[in-house]
Amino acid sequence: MKKNNYKFLPFAALLSTLLFTVSCSNDDKTGGTTEPPITEDRWITVAGAVMGTTDPVPGDGNGGTIVYSISKENAKDPSKSFDVFENGFVVPSNRTARLQSSQDGSRLFNIAYGGANGGEYSKYIVGGGQNFTQTGALVNISQYAGTSPRWAKLFDGDKTGIAVNVTSPTVVTEGETYLRTRGTATVLSLDLVNSFISQVKTYEIPLTQAEEIQGHHIFRLDAPVLNKAGNKLIIGTWMRKTNPATGTNQTEFTRLGSKSVVVDYPSLENPVIISSEIGFGDTSGYRSFNAFLADDGNIYQATQRDAQGSHILRIGQNNQYDNSYVFSLDAALGIENSYIETWKYAGNGKAIVAYTYDAAPVSTLSNQSQSFLALVDLNTKTAQKLDLPYDVDMYLFQYQGFVVDGYEIYVTLAPVGKDGRIYIINSQTGSVTEGAKLINKPGNHFTGAF
């Protein structure tokens, strides 16, 4: 009897454990997903772009940037109202600032865009409302990356920023024979903790001889991202083409496959170009992240100006494009000639995407196509348009930041010159919750949550 009891008790314990596990799994409404980190009592910093004063166009953002931080609790409260443009902190920048924030929202990083202080890096402690306290030294990178630098913070524990630049491409001929168009690229790493330039590399990045003789060249670099191994940076490109017969810019041309530049990290040396057979657009994005390292160890990168509409491409851990992965936003949403304006990875293969497309209404106020938001699933290659109060004057082309906190994605949404709100989107279900009201001013627009 003792022998039988000895066998039975462990089995009963095992059975109980299994039942408990199954019960917990059934209660897990997220289907076994891993919840991204949650920062308790974090700030949600709202950024707004001011309309310019010289030949102003509503939504141009040429009048600078204002930020205002709101507690997560208040950001979720639809009864709260905030006048960011009236009460916020003016970020140093002649035009729309290139902002980044720490993972927990406690720090704001800025590199001024244009003007006398263009290229100047500054860091702030976020203190609520208009309280942004500068910390660390000011660092001007303009001598390396220009006064309007493109840069992104790496997801390495808020330690490093990478700024990139290409000088104006120069046409090279031999007698009357066109040879190539090429600029000089700069890749710079910035220590965000101690506020200093840690590495700068400068080089030409040639395409193949066959591509260059046709006039193809790299016009801009942007949106760097660090791979899973931490030994390579993937940098997006914006491609252009010179007309070999005239030596001038050719606006209409057949695009090459989407390209990125891969450099060693942290040395920033040995630039190599990789090309996609799936996408045929640029991979540089616009003033925001355009590529993300996902949970599966792969990098996902959006395309712009793609003749077949925007795609999300996959770069494997071998640092090469995975041409077996095909995700067309056109196909996923049933639209034509989509354009991903900005996006952000939200964990578990899900991402939020701001986009427009050919048949979208055009605003008579800003002359821009209306923007929309979708939740995409990178694993199933599907997308759903989010249920939000859209408006023809909704303009997200200059949008820079989404806050991902657990399963919640915080978005600032308002038409140009009109009041709007913070909305909280569940990254797993796509459900939308209305948050605090945001007061706007004529010609201004909101450019992100950080």
Image (spheres, rainbow, N blue to C red):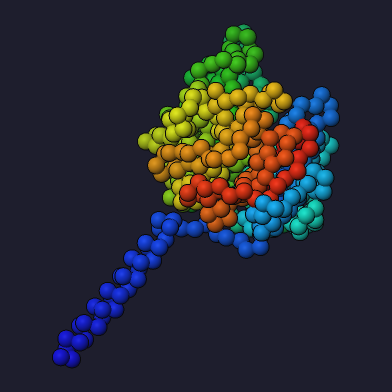
In the rendered view, tell whether residue 189 sits above or below residue 286: below
Residue for point 80% across, 27% down:
56
Q: Position of residue 349 (x, y in %)?
A: 45, 47
Q: Residue 94: percent from the left, percent from the top?
A: 80, 37
170 horizontally vs 230: left or right: right
Residue 74: percent from left, percent from top: 69, 56
Residue 64 is left or right of residue 264, and the answer is right
- Pick the quarter of the image with the N terminus: bottom left
The tally of labels here is 0
Q: Residue at x 54, y 16 (%)?
A: 253
Residue shown at 43%/57% (left/top)? Answer: 29
For the residue pair 64 and 1, the one nearer the viewer reads as: 1
Q: Is residue 85 above or below residue 137?
A: above
The image quarter containing residue 20 is bottom left
Q: Nearer the viewer, residue 300 or 48?
A: 48
Q: Is residue 232 visible?
A: no
Q: Is residue 86 visible?
A: yes
On the image, the x and y values in percent for residue 203 come to: 62, 34
Q: Is residue 192 left or right of residue 131?
A: left
